[in-house]
Image: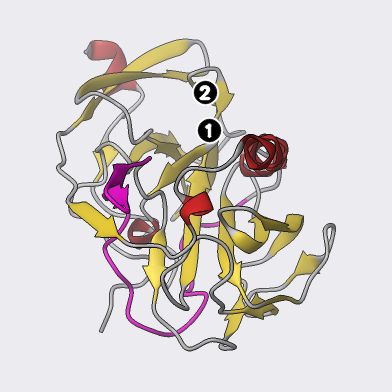
Amino acid sequence: MMLACRIAAVVLLCAAASHPRAAPATDASRPGGIAFIDLGPATAAAPAVTFADKPVLVYRDNGRWRAAVGVPLETVPGTIDVKVADRVVSLPVRAHSYAEQRLTVANPDHVSPAPVQLERIGRERAIIDAALGAWRDVPLEGIALAAPVGGPQSSSFGLKRFFNGEPRSPHKGMDIAAAEGTPVSAPRAGVVTATGDYFFNGNTVIVDHGQGLVTMYCHLSEIAVATGDELAEGEPLGAVGKTGRVTGAHLHFGVYLNGTAVDPALLLPKPQ
């Protein structure tokens, strides 16, 4: 406990306040949430922070270093141990319940894929996982994101999903309702690390914003970028569509930290 106090390991209940788009989080330290740690004044080099043997994003905020730890959705409420330099800090993870969602999809293969489709899914999963776990060591000022497309933002992250009555993995993104063909833009500067037409996700773009902050855009009607492209904030990367496993046109927007999906609402502006 004294050690935690000395390094000011405080779980913040808001996102980076120095960024004008920062969205306050009422209870960020939860499964699928973000544990923010105050690391002290930014008068020296940023300390190295790791969680589950993965590097953690550290950014400058109002003259202080702060870490943003993505808490996996499957985490059991209690505590997690985060390594800060040569110290271990225990952070609380609060319980959080997620609702259920029952959907009907027209293509039965999108519920129970055939063996040949499972092989394709496995190949695509390796590409997607590598892009979502990317690490590019660049300095960051805040971690807030702009909305990639205008439209109603669902609170669908973490939903326990049933497709045609069959239980499947929880939803690891936010669905944003918009008409097919609506432009989708980068929520902050980054580098495109993967694009493709994937079995479940349809036309997809993945963007690396640095230090493990990665965003994913699925079900696009078209892709307007290529792997390796450097994007400025607001630059178009594709358009809303209904490709892959969907029930209608929308954008699936995913946000990842240290290789784990976190609720995008924590880093987006609060809806007006």
Ranked by sequence position, the earlier of labels 1 and 2 is 2
From the image, which quarter does the N terminus lie in? top left
Position of residue 17 in the picture relative to residue 160 (left or right): right
Of the residues shown, which amino acid type is indicated by label 1? Answer: Val
Identify the element where label 1 is drawn: loop
Query: Badge 1 is on which residue?
Result: 56
Residue count near mark 1 (Cα–Cα under 10 Å), binned few <14, some 14–19, many ≥20: many
- Image: 74 above or below 189: above
Q: Residue 133 placed where, x, y %? A: 63, 37
Q: Residue at x 25, y 39 (%)?
A: 29
- Residue 94 quadrant: top left
Q: Which mark is residue 92?
A: none
- Residue 197 quadrant: bottom right
Q: CA distance from mark 1 to mark 2?
A: 5 Å
- Image: 109 above or below 92: below
Identify the element where label 2 is drawn: strand
Q: Residue at x 16, y 40 (%)?
A: 96
Residue 222 lies in the magenta-colored region: no
Q: Mark 1 touching mark 2, by CB under 8 A?
A: yes
Query: Badge 2 is on which residue?
Result: 50
Q: Is residue 158 visible?
A: no
- Image: 229 above or below 55: below
- Residue 240 quadrant: bottom right
Residue count near mark 2 (Cα–Cα under 10 Å), binned few <14, some 14–19, many ≥20: some
Of the residues shown, which amino acid type is indicated by label 2? Answer: Thr
Q: Residue 25 placed where, x, y %? A: 25, 56
Give, as a single range, the part of the protein colored magenta: 140-168
